Image (spheres, grey):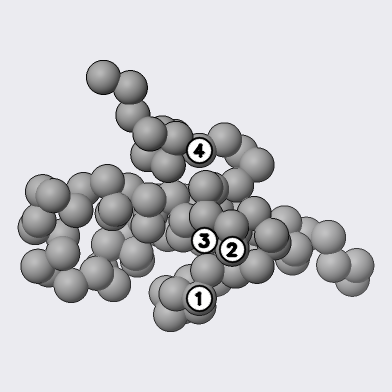
Amino acid sequence: MRQPAAFTSSSTSGSCRPCCRAGKLDPFYPHLKLPVTAKPRDVIKAAAKALHPWIRRQPGLRLSRRRFYRDMLNTHETTQDKARSVPT
């Protein structure tokens, strides 16, 4: 069975959500309080800790959690790109 496009792995151009493709940050990302230099693994760990334990336990929400983690990674990558492009 083929998965819908929203659940397939995203490309490097951004996630499926319009807020990330338009260059806007995900509204939840600042709550992670991560430095720009954080590694992708740190982003995933912070995002997982931010979710309520009940949400992390529900197998039916697995695809939604994956999408959430992917959005956090894409937003973090966008933030890093913006920080690199700022002239010093």
Dot 2 corresponds to which residue? 19
Residues marked 2 and 1 touching at CB (< 8 Å): yes
Residue 51 on image: x %, y %: 24, 69
Element at badge 3?
Answer: loop
Residue at horizontal 52%, vertical 47%?
Answer: 16
**Dot 4: element:** loop
| Mark toward the viewer: 3 or 1 | 1
Report whether residue 39 is seen.
no
The residue that disc 3 covers is 38
The amino acid pointed to by label 3 is: Ala
Check whether the beta carbons of the residues at disc 2 and disc 3 lie within 8 A of each other: no
Residue drawn at x 53%, y 48% is 15
Badge 1: few (under 14), some or many (20 or more) residues near its Cα, within 10 Å? few
Q: Quadrant of residue 20?
A: bottom right
**What is the three-letter code of the residue carrying label 1?**
Pro
Distance Cα–Cα, label 2 vs label 3 = 22 Å
Left/right placement of residue 62 relative to residue 19 reads left
Residue 70 image point, x, y percent: 44, 50
Q: Which residue is mark 1?
A: 27
Which of the marked residues, 1 or 4, is nearer the chain's N terminus?
Answer: 4
Q: Nearer the viewer, residue 39 or 27?
A: 27
User: In front of the other: label 2 or label 1?
Assistant: 2
- As drawn, the residue found furthest toward the top would be 1
Name the residue type under label 4.
Answer: Ser
Q: Secondary structure at mark 2?
A: helix
Q: Earlier in the sequence, mark 2 or mark 3?
A: 2
Q: CA distance from mark 3 to mark 1?
A: 18 Å
State the residue position of label 4.
10
Q: Position of residue 65 (x, y in %)?
A: 28, 54
Position of residue 48 measured from the top left corner of the image (x, y, whole percent): 27, 62
Mark 1 to mark 4: distance in Å?
Answer: 19 Å
* Vertical relation: 70 (above or below) 34: above
